[in-house]
Amino acid sequence: MSAADPPVPALAERAAACAERLRAADRVLLASHIDADGLTSGAIASNALERAGIDHETVFEKQLDEESIAGIAAREFETVLFTDFGSGQLDVIADHEAAGDFTPVIADHHQPADADTEYHLNPLLFGIDGASELSGAGASYVLAHALDPANRDLAALAVVGAVGDMQGGTEGLTGANEGIVDHAVAAGVLETRTDIALYGRQTRPLPKLLEYASDVRIPGISNDEAGAIAFLSELDIDVKADGDWRRWVDLDDAERRTLVSALLQRAVSSGVPASRIEELVGTSYTLTDEEPGTALRDVSEYSTLLNATARYERADVGLAVCLGERGAPLERARTLLRNHRRNLSEGLQWVKTEGVVEEDNLQWFDAGSRIRETIVGIVAGMAIGSPAVDRSKPIVAFAEKDAEHVKVSSRGSHRLVRQGLDLSAVMREASRAVGGDGGGHDVAAGATIPSGTQREFVAAADAIVGEQLE
Ligand code: C5P
Ligand code: C5P
Ligand code: C5P
Ligand code: ZN
């Protein structure tokens, strides 16, 4: 591969047109989404604009809607670059463009609304799946590469964004994302390997790594501190160094193999189904320029750290980290991460304790103010990934947004999507039926609805899911 080869050939022509338009701008307002994918999208775009000498300012929005787009228009920038959102609100954006408010350039991967614009870079327009094959950060990287092929180092952030949007399966990132991974590896900033697929390889002490692994439940180890410690103590490896627990990253290859094979044996002997056992091993992505043993070294831990900033109104902290600042912003991010982890674990526990309400075609819970609206989607995803919740129906979650609005998040599975599920359409149609709005991806989507319309919304969504899966 030569550095000039585009990461996603199908998008190259559109990306070149978008890059050309940005070069012609005096000043650009860069607007992005407040999650890991949105932050990395913003960082990639900001870096690329900076390197190209294009004057710009960066803002983050929780949700792009008529109000936030009007706010953006009021800033009076002639060119607005939207990353990780924009496609779902294309109708509203196109109206502003027609009114002469600004020229939009969009690098996104969400289902487009019914409208079009010239500088619209979205994998879905070129037959590439936006839920699993390319993220907002991936689309932003494609644009950055079109601005200058020397931007290949930025592909590392695009991998963080894709993993943050849960695009990686057990085989790791696939489809168009592989082109991004190849660029990052070729640039020397990323390493891929087959590895234990547990969250916290870099930072968690071994007992915590095993105890907190919630996606595949291993009896006597998962959610069982004493059991995890007993399991580790029986292994023929030094699990402590100077009295402290070692971490996965501290083990050598032989020690890692010993641990993995013991874990797989334990899973088999305690009756974990073969399909779930396979999920214990997968592709890991390591950022080679980052310090070993830190959250930034592992792409998955990095993305959680970013969510811990942006979803708590500290996108500035996450952006600083993505732009390479260490020291104070990183310390701040670590503190936010501890808080985020506590919230996720308390939120998941709450769902497990309270349970979900079963409808014919979906299941739901209403967390009210118990789970923050900015993380209720992550909790819903963790719930449906956990053995406590049935995976045969999509899950819909509500959380209070403000006095008048409720946030809705929904998560499905790839199996349901193959059967016809499209949560993006469910969220858009059911929310519009009750006076709200929504969108997203087939497998994960969200909406905002007026308070008090939850029951009506559930009835509408249940009917639409029923039609889709018929
Ligand atoms: O706004 P955005 O596209 O960034 O968010 C995507 C969301 O979809 C993430 O919260 C991610 O966890 C979720 N997702 C999922 N399962 C997938 C793909 C995405 O839960 N297979
Ligand atoms: O926060 P984020 O969406 O990046 O988390 C991705 C996944 O990582 C979660 O779905 C969860 O399974 C896992 N995770 C975890 N423990 C945490 C944070 C995240 O197991 N403290
Ligand atoms: O907020 P949540 O994580 O549930 O969002 C899931 C997906 O739905 C994300 O990709 C998000 O951007 C999208 N979404 C949307 N419109 C909304 C809410 C969420 O397109 N009103
Ligand atoms: Zn995204």
Image (cartoon, rainbow, N blue to C red):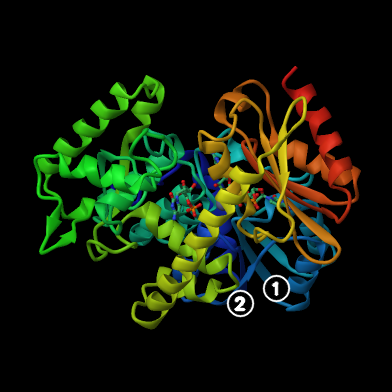
Q: Quadrant of the C terminus?
A: top right
Asked whether mark 2 and ligand 4 are closer than 8 Å, the reply comes as no
Count all numbered tags in the image, as a single digit. Answer: 2
Please tell me how crowded label 2 is: few (under 14), some (14-19), or many (20+) other residues with Cα within 10 Å. some
Q: Is residue 111 left or right of residue 258?
A: right
Quarter containing the N terminus: top left
Instruction: Point out which mark residue 459 bears.
Output: none
Classify mark 1: helix, strand or loop: loop
Q: Earlier in the sequence, mark 1 or mark 2?
A: 2
The disc placed on residue 27 is 2
Q: Amino acid at mark 2?
A: Arg
Q: Position of residue 8 (x, y in %)?
A: 45, 42
Task: Check disc 2 and report its element: helix, strand or loop.
Answer: strand
Query: Residue at the spot x=67%, y=37% of the render?
Result: 395
Find out whether the residues at labels 1 and 2 contact each other: C-beta distance under 8 Å.
Answer: yes
Q: Is residue 369 left or right of residue 40?
A: right
The residue shown at (66%, 33%) is: 394
Of the pair 470 and 233, the residue shown nearer to us: 233
Seen at 68% across and 28% down, the residue is 421
Residue 157 location, quadrant: bottom left
Q: Position of residue 312 (x, y in %)?
A: 58, 69
Q: CA distance from mark 1 to mark 2?
A: 7 Å
Provide the residue designation for mark 1.
78
Q: Which residue sits furthest front? A: 226
Residue 338's place in the image compared with 17, above or below, is below
- Would you place residue 179 above or below residue 319 in this image? above
> Could you tell me the amino acid type at mark 1?
Glu
- Expressed as whole percent of the image width and height from the top left, the position of residue 316 reads 52, 76
Quadrant of residue 403 in the image?
Answer: bottom right
